Amino acid sequence: MKSKLLTASLLATAVAAGLAAAPAMAQPGPAYPPHVVYAPATVQTPGIDNAQQAVSDRIRQGLQSGRITPSEARLLYRRDSDIQNREAAYKSDGRVTPQERQQLRNDMAQLSAEVERAIANNRTVAVAQPDRLGAIDSQQFNISRRIDEGVRSHRLSPQEAGRLQAREQAIERQEAAYRSDGVVTPQERSNLRAQLTALRDEVERLINPRG
């Protein structure tokens, strides 16, 4: 009799323990925070693009008003192209970090200040004297402007723009060497014009490739 009572007691205890455990087993596991997938930062930089367009417009206005000379504009456009190349490099990994965006904003602010200084200074466009190579300076400016436009319209890659700018700078160094003795001979002028014409044709070929 005692054995039966002991068995019934043990069975009841086991059933009660099972019922007590059942709700706990039915409860879901601990709620871990969901896995967070961080989307890469956007590569769009509309504020910087707008600043670049504003700077380009100011350079054009300065040229039209005669407050910026072709030589000044050439240097300013080159600075603008350098910033665009840096922007493209930042975008190459699929994201532009806050630090990179701030660097681009700082670069554009400095360039904008340089443009305004060029507009405000006392240098204006005048009738070119023969020894100042006015026509050659204008040709160099037009090439710089076309490279800048090509980069902005994505018709020129940063690598192509860099190569073209390197050629342009080499021509400028040669021009400076010709000027160093105070006299630029007709042969030297002809050589500069030929090099600039070849460079201009290369720029146009890359911007407007023929099928």
Image (cartoon, helix red, strand yellow):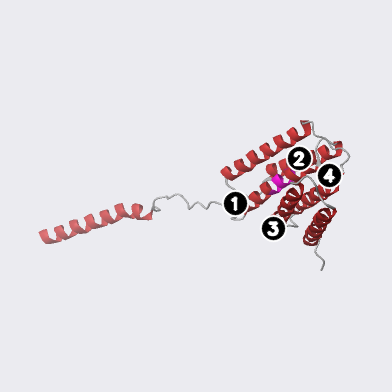
- Mark toward the start of the polypeptide (4 vs 1): 1
State the residue at coordinates (23%, 57%): 14
Q: Which mark is residue 72?
A: none
Label for residue 95?
A: 1
Please identify, in this view, whether the residue under mark 4 or under mark 1 is nearer the observer.
Answer: 4
Position of residue 200 measured from the top left corner of the image (x, y, whole percent): 80, 57
Residue 162 in view (yes/no): yes
Which residue does the numbered mark 3 point to in the structure image? 163
Q: State which mark lies toward you, 2 or 4.
A: 4
Q: CA distance from mark 2 to mark 4?
A: 34 Å
- The picture quadrant where one finds residue 103 is top right
Q: Which residue is mark 4?
A: 131
Residue 71, by quadrant, is top right
Q: Secondary structure at mark 1?
A: loop
Circles 3 and 2: CB distance less than 8 Å? no
Q: Earlier in the sequence, mark 3 or mark 1?
A: 1
Q: Is residue 130 magenta?
A: no
Q: Let me know if residue 78 is in the magenta part.
A: yes
Q: Which is more N-terminal, label 4 or label 2?
A: 2
Kind of residue at disc 3: Arg
Residue at 21%, 59% in the rendered image = 11
Instruction: Return the residue at label 2.
Output: 54
